[in-house]
Image (cartoon, helix red, strand yellow):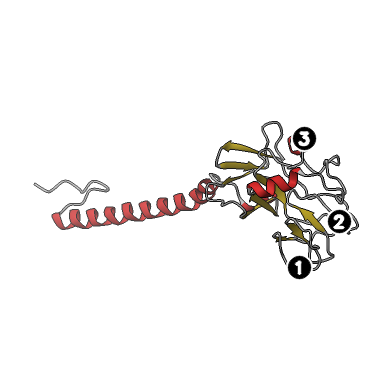
Amino acid sequence: MKASPELAGIPASAADCEAGDAQRRRMVLLTAATAGAGMAVTAVPFVSSFSPSERARASGASVEVDIADLAPGAIKTVEWRGKPVWIMRRTPEMVAALAEPDAHLVDPLSRREQQPGYARNAMRSIKPEVFVGIGICTHLGCSPNPVPQGSNNPSVGADWKGGFFCPCHGSTFDLAGRVFQNKPAPTNLEVPPHRYLSDTRLLIGEDGTTAA
């Protein structure tokens, strides 16, 4: 009796079975590799969406800053909207010096709109010891340098109590970013919207009422 004709797709011998199994394994591996490559391509934009992109930060995404390691008298600089933002922890002596009225300031009471309402005070800050300001001179956009009290910089004067000096055109600012008279800069340094998430964490760009 003759063997039945081979059914389509079913091998007729053990050798054929092994060849078929090997072929199937190759196909499974190839399919898995192709699928894996597809997942990698599609996963990249998905994973990157978990954190703000550089473009988002430049356009105004808020920046969270840890200031636990900020020593008295030190400054930490972070970037927000492509601008340097200074965070200074002022010493008790610095705070005391700012509390004294200075007739040489252009806008000592911060009447001009260079800061949120909660920073319209002598310290220009939420907490007296922490100053948050944009480190860009309001004259032509240079970045001032911190100059401590007792500096031998001839541009700040002998009675200098500490603050910031712009080397481009000579504008000077006190430790609250308030500009001195007879200088090129027309206004105080800008204070960005900000708020405290805790005693040691700041959020730059939001103040609880608005997002800038």
Residue 37 rendering spot, x and y as whole percentages: 43, 54
Depth check, front residue: 186 or 207: 186
User: Which kind of residue does numbered mark 1 sit on?
Assistant: Asn
- Describe residue 164's horizontal placement relative to residue 107 as left or right: left
1 or 2: tag closer to the N-terminus? 1
- Describe residue 20's horizontal placement relative to residue 59 as left or right: left
Q: Secondary structure at mark 2?
A: loop
3 or 1: tag closer to the N-terminus? 3
Depth check, front residue: 1 or 77: 77
- Describe residue 157's horizontal placement relative to residue 82 as left or right: right
Front of the two marks 1 and 2? 1
Depth check, front residue: 63 or 90: 90
Mark number for residue 192?
none
Q: Secondary structure at mark 3?
A: helix
Query: Callout 3 environment at 10 Å: few (<14), some (14 to 19), or many (20+)?
Result: some
Mark number for residue 117?
3
Q: State how far apart marks 2 and 3 are (Cα).
A: 22 Å
Mark number for residue 153?
1
User: Which kind of residue does numbered mark 3 sit on?
Assistant: Gly
Residue 210 rendering spot, x and y as whole percentages: 71, 34
Q: State how far apart marks 3 and 1 are (Cα).
A: 34 Å
Contact? badges 3 and 1 (CB < 8 Å): no
User: Which kind of residue does numbered mark 2 sit on?
Assistant: Ala
Q: Residue at x 53, y 44 (%)?
A: 50
Query: Callout 1 environment at 10 Å: few (<14), some (14 to 19), or many (20+)?
Result: few
Mark number for residue 185?
2
Q: Residue at x 70, y 45 (%)?
A: 96
Residue 157 rendering spot, x and y as whole percentages: 81, 63
Q: Residue at x 36, y 51 (%)?
A: 32
Q: Secondary structure at mark 1?
A: loop
